[in-house]
Amino acid sequence: MTLGEMCSVQRGKRLTKRDLNHNGRFPVFHGGIEPIGYYSSSNREANSVMVINVGASAGTVGYSSKEFWSSDGCFCFSHCEQLNQKYLFYALQSMENSIKGQVRKAGIPTLDNKVVEKLKIPIPSLAEQQRIVSILDKFEALTTSISEGLPKEIALRRKQYEYYRNQLLSFA
């Protein structure tokens, strides 16, 4: 099925810089998967998928486990009973290069909502979607753990090397 047949593609509402504040409760996403600030209310529920539709990050797929404010710089998808949002995130993430390939590059890079609506997504049963999400979440956690732990391990090995080098070359 196409994504447009499964759920509606929703575009957010723009906020001005004046509307943003650091004391706001909800992150604001516009043109990237890092928040540009915070706002006092949300327009998207937790566990929602987004696809950035403007700027250098156009075509990038993101996911928020918390409520947030979606500006007009990203598309989000209505929640529906037969589609697990985290499964949708992983499915779209696997298609990210193809999505980015359909971004119009003239002036400001832009992704048209019709492109997103026509994306074909395999839809297994909800139980199978949950099983896939569970497996991919475990891989993601493992990858994150390795990415965070590796620099610490390298620093410890470097310190160990320096210690033994100094011991070996001290000739005391």
Image (spheres, grey):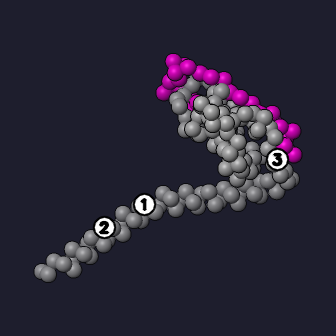
Earlier in the chain: of badge 3 and badge 2, it is 3
For label 2, the residue is 159
- Give the amino acid type for the residue marked by disc 1 in the picture: Pro
Which mark identifies residue 14? none
Indicate yes or no whether the magenta region holds residue 94: no
Residue 72: x, y in percent?
65, 27
Task: Report the side of 8 relative to 23 (left or right).
Answer: right
- Would you call the spot at circle 1 few (<14 residues within 10 Å), some (14-19), or many (20 or more)? few
Q: Residue at x 66, y 41 (%)?
A: 59
Quadrant location of the C terminus? bottom left
Residue underneath mark 1: 151
Q: Which residue is mark 3?
A: 120
Calculate the distance from the C-alpha at mark 1 to the C-alpha at mark 3. 39 Å
- Around disc 2, counting alpha carbons within 10 Å, would you say few (fewer than 14), some (14 to 19), or many (20 or more)? few
Q: Residue at x 81, y 40 (%)?
A: 118
The residue range painted magenta reads 1-29
Relative horizontal placement of residue 121, taking residue 42 as reference (left or right): right
Whether residue 57 sits left or right of residue 101 in the image: it is left
Is there any visible trace of residue 66 in the rendered image? no
- Mark 3 and 2 residues: CB-CB less than 8 Å, in contact? no
Residue ID at (59%, 40%): 57
**Whole-number angstrom distance, CA of label 2 to CA of label 1:** 12 Å
Counting from the top left corner in percent of width and height, residue 54 is at 62, 33
Q: Nearer the viewer, residue 105 or 122?
A: 105
Tag 2: amino acid: Lys
Please say if the residues under marks 1 and 3 sit with CB atoms less than 8 Å apart. no
Q: Indicate the amino acid at tag 3.
A: Lys
Vertical arrangement, residue 63 with respect to residue 106, above or below: below
Q: CA distance from mark 3 to mark 2?
A: 51 Å
